[in-house]
Image (cartoon, rainbow, N blue to C red):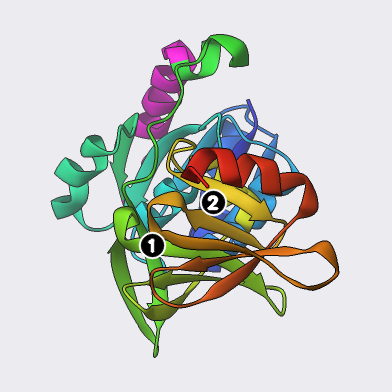
Amino acid sequence: MRILVVDDEAPARARMRLLLQELGRTEVREAASVKEAVARLAEAPAELVLLDIQMPLLDGFDLVDLLPDPKPAIIFVTAYAEHAVKAFDVAATDYLTKPVRKERLEQALKRVERSASVSLPTADRPPSPALTRITAERANTLHVLDVDGCAVFFAEDKLTYVNHSGVRHRVNATLDEIEARLDGDRFLRIHRHAIVNLDQVAELHAWFAGAWRVRLKDGSEWDVARRRVGEVRGRVGF
């Protein structure tokens, strides 16, 4: 079983790796932050994420929102037992409190191995529900945004942003990762640099040299890839 350990504290990651090795689980990688975990999972999927909750900037629940499909099993590992209810609300397989005992970890691993999320083939796994909220950063503050209010997700200077209610926020995920979790009936990738909320499209107009642009209700304008023009026109009724 491929395992990713996500914890901002190096000693905690080292202890977890040692416990996993003692239990015969050697296919283990590590990440020190949510951003690093997203990158690790993009490089190679995992079947299980052992996930700390309290980390700087983005916490463990933020990572759950950003996990690509098919989602791995989640075991939360934290010193704070008060998060247990929320952990199971997001369909965690188990919840371990620090310091983790080897016997308790083994029990949790066996539970994962018995669960359908690991044993079912990828094609048979039920799809994850579309995102309804997303965590984004602005002015060194994390904001939980409702996806309905997101007008456009876009990439700029190797970073990803979202315009929500006329305000720009930074998102710690790639456009590909975000696109995979959005409702495809409401959001459309119009260009490799932009995903728009179709409910926010106010106008589609010709640009120079045969190019097209959409203007959103917030007044911003975005290029439409030539191969996407027909789909945009059909989806928004132009």
Residue reaching furthest to the bottom: 139
Horizontal relation, residue 223 to residue 47: left or right:
right
Residue 224 appears in view:
yes
Where is residue 76 drawn, in percent x and y?
36, 44
What amino acid does circle 1 point to?
A: Cys
Horizontal relation, residue 89 to residue 236: left or right:
left
**Which residue corresponds to the image point at 35% horizontal and 29% vertical from the top-left?**
93
Secondary structure beneath dot 2 equals: helix
Please tell me in which quadrant of the rendered image residue 10 appears. Answer: bottom right
Give the vertical position of 97 relative to 91 (above or below): below
Of 130 and 229, the residue lying toward us: 229
**Which residue corresponds to the image point at 45% horizontal and 35% vertical from the top-left?**
185
- Is residue 184 a member of the stretch shown in magenta? no
**Which residue corresponds to the image point at 53% horizontal and 11% vertical from the top-left?**
119
**Total of numbered circles in the picture?**
2
Give the vertical position of 146 relative to 116 (above or below): below
Q: Which mark is residue 178?
A: 2
The part of the chain drawn in magenta is 98-116
Which quarter of the image is occupied by the N terminus?
Answer: top right
Q: Which mark is residue 150?
A: 1
Q: CA distance from mark 1 to mark 2?
A: 12 Å
Give the vertical position of 145 relative to 232 (above or below): below
Number of other residues with Cα within 10 Å of mark 1, as a class: few under 14, some 14 to 19, many 20 or more: many
